Image (cartoon, coloured by chain):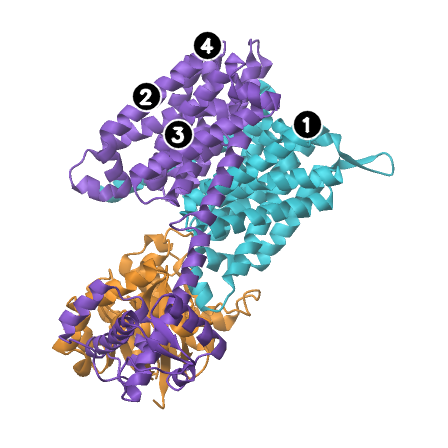
Amino acid sequence: MQTLIDFITFKDPNVIYVVLGMICINTSSAVIGTFAFLRKRALIGDAIAHALLPGVCLGFILAGDKNIIYLLGGAFLTGWLATFLVDYIVNQTKIKQDAAIGIVLSTLFAFGIVLMSVIQNGDYANEGGLNNFLFGQAAAINKDEVYIFGIILLVILVATYFFYRAFLSISFNYDFAASAGLPVKTIEFVLTSLTVLAIAAGIQALGVVLMSALIITPAAAARFWSNNLRVMLLIAVVFSVFSGVLGAYVSYANAGVPTGPWVVLILSLITIISFVFSTKKGILYRILLANKNKRKIFTENILKSIFQWHEKKQKDIAEPFAAADLLSVRLFSTRELNKGLVKLKQKGLLVADGTKFYLSAEGIVESKRIVRLHRLWEHYLLRRTSMDENHVHAGAEAIEHVLSPEIEKELEKELGILGIPKDDY
Amino acid sequence: MMNDIWILLTASLVAINAALLGCFLLLRKMALVGDAISHAVLPGIVVAYYFSGDKTSLLLLIGATLTGVVASLMIDFLTKKAKIQGDASIGITYTLLFAVGMILISTWLKGNVDIDMDCVLYGEIGLINLDKIIIDGNLYIGPMAFYTELFAFFCIGLTLVLGFKGFKLLAFNEDYARGLGINTTRWHYVLMTLVSLTTVVSFEVVGAVLVVGFLIIPAATAQLISKKLNRMMFLAAIFGIAAVVIGYALAIWLNVNITGAMVSVSGIIFMMVLIIDKFFRKQQVSKSLNPA
Amino acid sequence: MENCSIEVHNLTTTYGGAPVLWDVDFELPVGQIIGVIGPNGSGKTTLLKTIMGLLEPSSGFVKIFNQDLDKIRERVAYVPQRESVDWDFPASVYDIVMMGRYRKHNLFRRTNKTDIDIVNQSIEKVGLTEFKNRQIAQLSGGQQQRVFIARALAQRAELYLMDEPFVGVDAATESSILSLLQEMKNDGKTVLIIHHDLQTVSDYFDYLVLLNTRLIAKGTPQEVLTKENLTNAYGGQLTLLAKVASLIKENEFPIREKDMDF
């Protein structure tokens, strides 16, 4: 508990840098990652992240110390080399993109491992810090680095603000953007540079092995909540920053525990929660929707059979009927039917009168609407498709429950039918 | 000297196993699924090791292999049920499972020497001789790792020889195979199990991260210049072994990380073959354009 | 229909919740060349894949020669779209055609003399004997299409389902495929072909199925190719149908009530 209080109150001044650093890093990568995700180039980020290792090591060897400018410079260089190589292999050979990513990723990472062993065998001061680039150590973020991460974030945000439409159009449809005369090559160059920059900033906290999660996962989780790019960007940033700060805390509270795995774990949990509870595509929502549809279909079927019974008996629609009467026009289970009648009563569509029922004014309108839709659809199928009179009823069953008022109007216009068609198939 | 030979033999088996399976992964455009599985076996290895306390137990082999299969199930689930695009599903799956593995190592196995972060990255190929098999108290017949690799080699070899037609059909035209009534899902998971098995047995030798270099690079190099599937498999194995031998020699000479050197050399071989192949193609084209 | 090659009954197949094929119902004759036509995205390939059991219908069923597909798979050959595979695959013409001899139960068996003879005959029938050992990547589009047809021929089936075999082929290949189809018809085989070129349908096919999500018409070319049918299929008259289909998808509605238990 004490550590939590220390962490929240920034008692340890380092905590401020860590939190600020994580906010910068995670915001940068979530913004850039959302575009990479939409462009279906999420795993290029993986290749770039792994490829940063030799760059970082080269920077270290050249600087002779853990100088953030050298390290970032080296990382930027090899990160770019990785994207160039992937594109080169895909364009020049029959090797597909996924394999090209695998080749570049493992070769450059292996070379980084070789360079690391060179550094470990040589006379370098402070070489231990390099290990942080493998699995991430947010606690190692210092004041200078926060400034640099802040500048990177600023560059990314400003670029995204000014190039928003350009990024959007090449992410949405590259070929269309090219045919519309947009400078797609330049836009792509800018976007790739920003991607490398965002990843280079992040490996300090996440490590090269897991960095791609910071690119891919926030966007994937945000996708469950919104179809709007601006909203998606915002949600991705919130998810990412939350996981980043929480992960940094866990790693802060337990000395020696790397940050990367915890951030990834929290991010993945958020994605799973999004998948279950999202109001757009979540699995829970879909189950509820299916149940709602089921109930709607059932009550509407009762209304329909009430109409049909009156029609068959040539009675006025407002006249009372018994529950059992409905069984003569449609097969219901008695228990389910009674439940459905109660529900209709609650909705004010049905009025109970002793053992009998009659439709309320609203109920009459509703039952007429449903029968009408069903019959309009039957007519449509008869006219437009090869379906014959024996089949249209089954074909139209269920459809009346989904037809919207707009479609009803269009059907009316196309078929030229007003009121309720008499013929029932 | 004897130690070097055993290391080379063991690493060559790793290379052959991975290269053979890599051919099918590549042709099925599942190179990165292989990458994901190799990362994802980590939590399986850690959990199995934690309970068995042994790096070469059967429990570990089975448990960790199953984790790899779970990873491929998870990728399928994310793509088909959660409707997340394929590349992102792979990324999410492998980062999550790998992160769980790392967390388990840093908590359960804190300070353990058998499985630590370095081992995860590049294995302990230089140390495999510590775990020797000695018969009758003095007859040394090689390191344990060699025999687990040999076991995997027999599993893979037997399955690929017997199921060659099936795997070939699956790789070229899955819909057609299903049209013939072949249960392609079953064949798919047999392949995934083999990939998983390979990465598990190779963990100790080359680690969980670099093994992907053994799976993909030699197979891709062979793909550049092969017109027949069996030739591609043969060449992939040869390229794999070449990378192992050259990489090992370089690593000893320059005193650098062995596994890193092997995969780096593999990547260099790939680039060389690519460039030479392109050069010859150009010559052929210019010859056919201006016949002397 | 007494002699019925394919019977499709009330078939509905959905993609992501929206019906792509909707209550399609027909019976097809034996020993004829049958064309499936309809605009892009009208469910032609979906129909073929559902017949082949590659897609699970959400309602309805398919019978082939009055039996379930699983019982008579050996009598059905499938020619997928040429673009559906990667032609960079390291294999020769012979290797691919040999796949036509693969069966569910013989995958672990070695190929025998009969298989080899049949494969060579099939390659000869499509006129690719001189390219027998060539890698498939080095063939023209028309030649690749002929490899697929040779593979189907090697199956020695009675019913052939071909997905757009005339797409991207040269005139020579087109006429050689046509004469091959006539030959197959004379041998009593049934061929179902997805086709998109309305100009040629009446010359190529004995029987037609006109599709646009729903079955618009079926019968001889004269019966099907009426102005009314074509307007219904191609004239954008079915926009309402498309709107309803997307409403169903949006609301995740069941297509048929009996799919749900109350």
Residues at marks 4 and 2 on the same chain: yes
The answer to whether the residues at label 4 and label 2 have Cβ atoms under 8 Å apart is no
Identify the residue at the far right of this view: B136
Q: Which chain is cyan?
A: B
Residue type indicated by callout 2: Leu
Chain letter for purple? A
Which residue has dot 3 on it?
A29
Q: For the residues marked 4 and 3, what is the alpha-carbon distance in whole angstroms?
A: 27 Å
Q: Chain of mark 1?
A: B
Asked which quadrant contains residue B150, the reply is top right
A132 or B166, which lies in front? A132
The quarter of the picture where residue B133 lies is: top right
From the viewer's perspective, is A158 left or right of A60? left
On the image, the x and y values in percent for residue A369 come to 25, 72
Q: Which mark is residue B110?
A: 1
Give the residue pinned by disc 2.
A154
* Mark 4 and mark 2: Cα distance apart in space: 26 Å
